[in-house]
Structure formats: C-alpha cells, structure tokens
Image (spheres, helix red, strand yellow):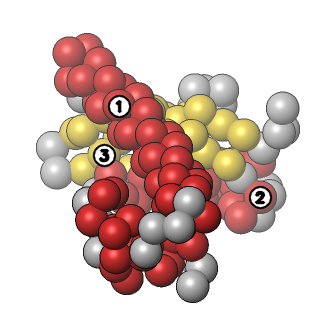
Amino acid sequence: MNPNLYQVTATPSGKWWAITVDDLPGVFAQAASFRAVEDAAKEAIGLYLDIDPAEVLAVVTPNVGEELDRRIRQRQRRVHELQQMQVEVATESRQTAQDLIDAGLTQRDVAQLLGVSFQRISQLVGD
C-alpha cells in the first residue's frame, strides 16, 4: 500500500465542496467544484504532512446522500464493465476481420458482414 494514499470524502456545502481526509482527522479543505476536490485535498494533505502535494494520491468519494451515492457507484461499475466489453469487442472484431480476410473475403465484404466501414476494416487488419 502506498504510504501517501489517502481516502478523501467530498460533501456539497452550499456552493462549495467540503473536503475531509478520512485517515487524517482535522485535515479539511474546500473546493468550488468537484473537479477541484482532488487537487485541494492533495494540497491540504501536503501542507499537513509537510510533503510535496504531487507525492500524494487522493481517492475521492462523493457524499451526496445514500441513494445518490449508491447510484453513482452503480453507474461507475457499469461504465467500467462497458469499457471492458468495448476492449473485448475490439479484440474480437480485429480477429474476426483477419480470419475472414484469411478465408479469402475482400475487405469490402468483411466490412459489410461486420457492419463497419471499409476504412475501419483497413484499420483493424493493418492494411
């Protein structure tokens, strides 16, 4: 485990995000947007520990309410699953396209069979 890895919780507070560092009680920060939370947390942790903020790894968890937090986590899992599936489909497409060409089909026919453009087949098989 990285000694400079910290779990951070970000909770909306008016127009700001209130930031707490789970492993460092008393370390607080704020950010004007969720996008800025990680940097603000790293800066606060760096100041508290007297280390370069670039050496800090902050894992940010939003705290927007139990139901919404659950939905965010569910969406993140589904996006991750989708990304994995896209990698698998790309690998299968590449192999299937190559196998069809090796079987004597033209790139145009392979494109039609796989439902992609002729140019995409050229990219997949490297021709």
User: Which residue is most to the left?
Assistant: 14
Q: Quadrant of residue 52?
A: bottom right
The kind of residue tagged 3 is: Trp
Q: Which mark is residue 78?
A: 1
Name the element at disc 1: helix
Camera-nearest residue between 125 and 36: 125
37 above or below 123? above
Q: How packed is label 3: few (under 14 Cα within 10 Å), some, or many (20 or more)?
A: many
Image coords of residue 45 (percent x, y): 65, 48
Above or below 61: residue 95: below
Residue 106 seen: yes
Question: Which residue is drawn at the image coordinates 45% and 67% (left, top)?
Answer: 105
The residue to which callout 2 is attached is 55
First-in-chain label (2 vs 3) = 3
Kindly report the distance in space between the C-alpha atoms of the residues bearing marks 2 and 1. Answer: 30 Å
Task: Work out whether mark 3 precedes mark 1 in sequence or the reverse, and give the earlier one.
Answer: 3
Give the class, few, some or many, for how many residues have Cα within 10 Å of label 1's Cα (few <14, many ≥20).
Answer: few
Which amino acid lies under the numbered mark 2 shown in the image of this protein?
Glu
> Given this view, does label 3 or label 1 mark the residue nearer the observer?
1
- Which label belongs to residue 109? none
